[in-house]
Amino acid sequence: SQQGEEDPQALSIQEGENATMNCSYKTSINNLQWYRQNSGRGLVHLILIRSNEREKHSGRLRVTLDTSKKSSSLLITASRAADTASYFCATTTGNTPLVFGKGTRLSVIA
Amino acid sequence: GAGVSQSPSNKVTEKGKDVELRCDPISGHTALYWYRQSLGQGLEFLIYFQGNSAPDKSGLPSDRFSAERTGGSVSTLTIQRTQQEDSAVYLCASSYGPQRGDTQYFGPGTRLTVL
């Protein structure tokens, strides 16, 4: 069953703009992870945020987590054409498999 | 070091035939996962191996699907009597720790097309 749901399903922006993607989930979690997928192939791990954390940064990525609202956001600043990909959130509750959402398709137009 | 590798990268087969998909995880990773991704969809969990423990097969969609992991390393996913709805990208991932919520490292996937 789908735990995380990304919003929007698709996003198109100009190079240099910021991109914000949201993820909502239903049950309490231990951690939430964001992954990127290029061209429908393997996923690449971007960032992990634990349930007791509220914000994490990695380069141009900023992730926030609001456990009271059961939601997370991924912000990509100063986007580049190379950021074009699908972005997935994945959650885990204790020792359970990661459950992935359907993803947000981001298109960055040069 | 080397990442997760999968073979073949593409497989086209006829309905009713059996297929085997292979995954070589990152050396030292104790956990291995198989997922399926249909076009435009998220990842569907299939099966999870952790060390010598019995695998979690709860995600396998039917008894036509099976998987094994030999020597705690290489894994093979077998689909018997393939159906057209089996067409998808099959992704393998491995992780270092025993917790299923650990960061997973994905292979490039095998795109299976059943005609």
Image: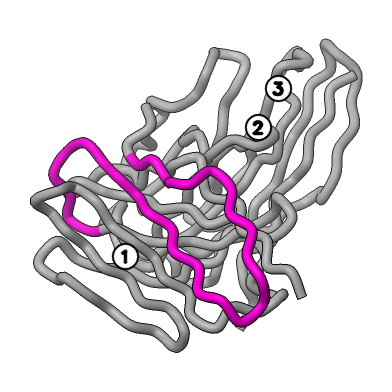
* Viewport quadrant of the N terminus of chain B: bottom right
Who's the residue at 53% across and 71% down the image? Answer: B27
Residue topped by disc 3: B86
Quadrant of the image occupied by residue A22? bottom left
Q: Are marks 1 and 2 on the same chain?
A: yes
Who's the residue at 36% across and 76% down the image? Answer: A62
Circle 1/circle 2 CB separation < 8 Å: no
Residue A13 highlighted magenta (yes or no)? yes
Residues packed near mark 1 inside 10 Å, few (<14), some (14 to 19) or many (20 plus): some
Q: Residue extending furthest bottom? A: A59
Q: CA distance from mark 2 to mark 3?
A: 9 Å
Q: Given the image, what chain letter belongs to the residue carrying mark 1?
A: B
Question: Residue B107, image x and y in percent?
Answer: 64, 59
Mark sitting earlier along the chain (1/2)? 2
Q: CA distance from mark 1 to mark 2?
A: 28 Å
Tag 1: amino acid: Gly
In the depicted view, which residue is nearer to us: A102 or B56? A102
Left or right, residue B20 beside residue B70 = right
Q: Callout 2: helix, strand or loop? A: loop
Left or right, residue A61 beside residue B19 = left
* Magenta span: A4-31
Residue topped by disc 2: B38
Tag 2: amino acid: Ser
Mark sitting earlier along the chain (2/3)? 2
Question: Residue B82, image x and y in percent?
Answer: 76, 17
Residue topped by disc 1: B97
Tag 3: amino acid: Asp
On residue B75, the disc is none
